[in-house]
């Protein structure tokens, strides 16, 4: 029994590169070890794709604002923020989240968890912290 990594390396060796499309194409064969890791029912997979498209639409919606003191250039932020709920996440208007202490704390907790995951993922690259420091300095 080979590992997921081994199977993905095999796809890469066969095609000279590794892309999601190559993995899907290779796994279409019902005998392939990766076949069972995919949903092949088009009705189910089609609906999942539409949910993914809807997710991207929600993420693309933006609002433009100017700082409260009217100084500086206009900025834009996402119009909706993912807020943890009992059954996953829901998207709420950013203005509502900003005004609601509980939802704001939930979003900030998610931000912290994501930041720590990013740090854990890349901290061994000494350039990573330099990139963060540079970008945070530019954003301030």
Image (cartoon, rainbow, N blue to C red):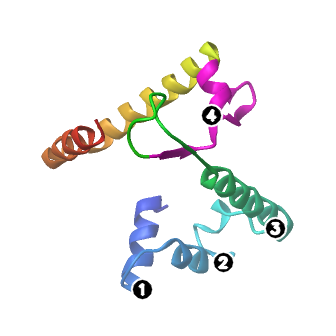
Q: CA distance from mark 4 to mark 3?
A: 36 Å
Question: Mark 2 touching mark 3, by CB under 8 A?
Answer: no
Q: Which residue is mark 4?
A: 94
Residue at (47%, 74%) from the top-left corner? 19
Question: Mark 4 touching mark 1, by CB under 8 A?
Answer: no
Q: CA distance from mark 2 to mark 3?
A: 12 Å
Q: Earlier in the sequence, mark 4 or mark 3?
A: 3
Q: Which residue is mark 3?
A: 41
Residue at (73%, 56%) from the top-left corner? 54
What secondary structure is found at the residue carrying circle 4? Answer: helix
Q: Residue 88: x and y, percent?
A: 70, 33
Q: CA distance from mark 1 to mark 3?
A: 26 Å
Q: Earlier in the sequence, mark 1 or mark 2?
A: 1
125 vs 46, left or right, is left
Viewer-nearest of discs 4 and 3: 4
What secondary structure is found at the residue carrying circle 1? Answer: helix
What range of the chain is rendered magenta? Answer: 74-99
Q: Residue 120: x and y, percent?
A: 31, 36
20 drawn magenta: no
Q: Which residue is mark 1?
A: 15
Nearest the viewer among 88 and 107 is 107
Regarding residue 103, the answer to whether it shows in the image is no
Q: Looking at the rendering, in which quadrant would you find the C terminus? A: top left
Q: In the rendered view, would you say 28 is above or below 110? A: below
Furthest residue to the bottom?
15
Quadrant position of residue 115: top left
What secondary structure is found at the residue carrying circle 2? Answer: loop
Q: Which residue is mark 2?
A: 28
């Amino acid at each position: 029994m080979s590992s997921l990594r081994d199977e993905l390396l095999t796809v890469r060796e066969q095609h000279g590169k590794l892309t999601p499309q190559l993995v899907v194409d290779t796994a279409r064969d019902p005998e392939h070890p990766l076949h069972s890791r995919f949903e092949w029912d088009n009705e189910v997979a089609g609906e999942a794709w539409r949910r993914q498209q809807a997710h991207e639409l929600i993420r693309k919606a933006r609002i433009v604002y100017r700082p409260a003191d009217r100084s500086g250039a206009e900025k834009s932020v996402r119009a909706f923020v993912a807020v943890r709920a009992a059954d996953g996440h829901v998207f709420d208007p950013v203005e509502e989240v900003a005004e609601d202490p509980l939802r704001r704390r939930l979003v900030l907790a998610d931000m912290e968890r994501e930041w720590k995951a990013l740090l854990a993922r890349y901290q061994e690259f000494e350039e990573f912290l330099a990139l963060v420091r540079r970008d945070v300095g530019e954003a301030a």
